[in-house]
Amino acid sequence: MTRANLDKQPHEVASMFDDVAANYDLTNDVLSLGQDRRWRKEVAKAVDARPAQKILDLAAGTATSSQPFARAGAYVVPCDFSLGMLRVGKQRHPWMPFTAGDGTKLPFRDDVFDAVTISFGLRNIQDTEQALRELYRVTKPGGRVVICEFSHPTWGPFRTVYEEYLMRALPPVARAVSSNPDAYVYLAESIQSWPDQPTLAGLLQKAGWSKVAHRNLTGGIVALHRGYKHP
């Protein structure tokens, strides 16, 4: 198994990420032209982790995304369904409570976390609406969700250039830097088929989240969505 299909069978997606785990963070840095670091900083600001808060970082992979929350003094649980990613993460951050879990049936009780967040992973979960409901379930009343996901550039000419990059430039770059370039063909296809910003905001509201808002980063290549659970 080298790449998943757009029906996103969980075992296929997990296997694909197992294959790329060792070089995943480096590859993302190259393919995003370093922008992923800036996006992660924006996520950290939006989550606004505080000491002693409990934070779920879903689709955390190797837990690169979890580090800002831990540095803020929060208790952060990196959760992912790729055991390969979790193994690499555990080698790098042995003190963190890595947890294997499927986003459509999270292994946590109701009302546990002050904040839940997922960066570049919601797109890979087979049932988006069920994942948003599960995130809602495990969040404490008054808690918050922050989703960082690839989205759709809002300016037409830029969107055209970006889509050309995704489908033409990304695969050869991935071949040069990744152990599994086919996985990045899936990445490009999954980005193109992903809902736009207003559609995802509507799915958040449907799952129960209130005060749903989003803002674009890098012209809409990425969007940050947030919402709150009723107190």
Image (cartoon, grey):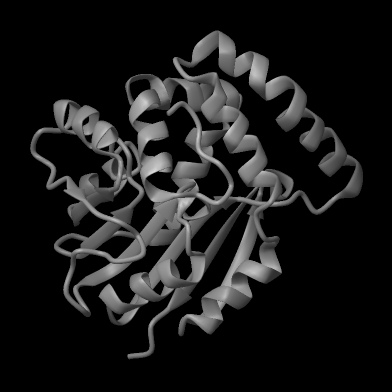
Spot occupied by residue 178 in the image (x, y as percentages of width and height): 48, 16
Spot occupied by residue 114 in the image (x, y as percentages of width and height): 26, 71
* Numbered label tally: 0
Which is more toward the observer, 35 or 171?
A: 171
Which is more toward the observer, 86 or 212?
A: 86
Classify residue 123 as left or right of residue 51. right
Spot occupied by residue 131 in the image (x, y as percentages of width and height): 41, 66
- Residue for point 17% across, 45% down: 98
Q: Residue furthest bottom?
A: 231
Classify residue 86 as left or right of residue 7. left
Which is more toward the observer, 1 or 26?
A: 1
Classify residue 227 as left or right of residue 202. left
Say if residue 34 shows up in the picture: no
Quarter of the image where one finds residue 40: top left
Q: Residue furthest right?
A: 157
Q: Residue furthest top?
A: 176
Say if residue 136 shows up in the picture: yes
Residue 144 vertical placement versus 118 (above, below): below
- Residue for point 29% across, 66% down: 105
Quarter of the image where one finds residue 15: top left
Spot occupied by residue 124 in the image (x, y as percentages of width and height): 48, 49
- Residue for point 14% across, 63% down: 52
Residue 121 vertical placement versus 138 (above, below): above
- Residue for point 73% across, 51% down: 152
- Pick the quarter of the image with the N terminus: top left
- Pick the quarter of the image with the C terminus: bottom left
